[in-house]
Amino acid sequence: MTGSPAPRPASASVPDLAPAAVPGPGRRPRRVARPDVRTLSLVGVLLALVAVGGITRPEQFLSSGNLVLILTQSSVIGVVTVGMTFVIIGGGIDLSVGAVVALATVWATTLATQEYGLGGILVCAVLVGVGCGLVNGALVAYGRMVPFIATLAMLASARGLALQLSDGRTQVVDDEAVLRLGYEESRVLGVPPLVLVFAAVTVLGWLLLNRTTFGRRTYAVGGNPEAARLAGIDVHRTRLLLYLLSGLCCGIAAFLLIVLTGSGQNTNGNLYELDAIAAAIIGGTLLSGGRGTLTGSVLGVLVFTTITDIFALNNLQSDVQQIAKGLIIVAAVLVQRRADRGTAL
């Protein structure tokens, strides 16, 4: 009879749940967290654009007034992009955001609405946005319509209704409280109220996406709806809430646009849907859903707005600007694919 077998090392009976901060002999350390390649690439692009602007038009571009202008111009489309990012991460798309912004600006600047002052204009813009988002969400979540078709129908309907309400005319805002928000004396520590609203929406959106159950459900529904359903997530309700959130952002953006322009018209928000989708894509949001960050989307908005500002200061044509945007989108997608291959290794 042989002797009893040698006892197994204690580490063999304990599951390897600890991090590989102190790997054993012959063990390969686990990969540690590293900065997101997409975010770093966008920061690099933004810094390169700042350098180009500083070289070509140093006095104008680097002035505090121009930097504030870039942030102000980013505010409206930035708020829209926050809502769009949620929808895309959840596996949907919203082609109606520009038309909803136009409808909200027109409806909120009618003479009947302006009689209620700043509060009435703000509430009307938000309610119109949320109402359109509710219709989109109901059609997609419970009507089982393809998001592309449902929101395309909303785009056409909202544009038509905005044209009917305004009769093709620009509606000027007479309420002094609304107009005062766009004045320089309304700035807080030199920052316009529009930029502060954009920052607040971004921070709240980031917290909602990254620190709440709703955010985790958004990623789950966008990544694999069937698996999310089997895990007990109400997929239909989540999709409805995502479009409601997008509509809310459109309503807020419409109010910011009213403050910025002092008017409402049916041509507002033209191509906002394309700009918001493009900003989200170059920010690392996957069009098929399940992946994306608000940080990347906001950086995408700043990149596009900075490009527009540089081209305007250098008196370059808009067609060249559109070509530059297209090249940036292609480059961003290529960077994403390279980063995905690196992660899979």
Image: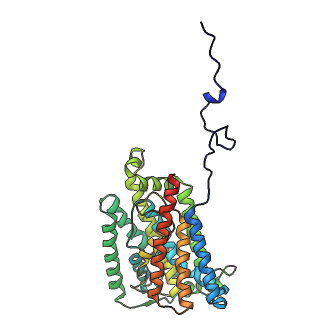
Image quarter of the N terminus: top right
Which residue is at 66% across, 85% downward? Answer: 62
| Image quadrant where residue 200 sits | bottom right
In the image, is residue 17 above or below residue 167? above
Is any part of residue 250 visible from this angle? no
| Image quadrant where residue 306 sits | bottom right
Number of numbered discs: 0
Which residue is at 63% across, 45% downward? Answer: 29
Q: 252 or 215, which is in the foreground?
A: 215
In the image, is residue 259 above or below residue 44? below
Residue 166 as seen in the image, left or right of residue 341: left
Residue occupying the far bottom of the picture: 315
Q: Position of residue 180 (x, y in %)?
A: 59, 86
Q: 265 or 331, which is in the foreground?
A: 331
Residue 150 as seen in the image, left or right of residue 20: left
Q: Position of residue 343 (x, y in %)?
A: 52, 54
Which residue is at 45% across, 62% downward? Answer: 286
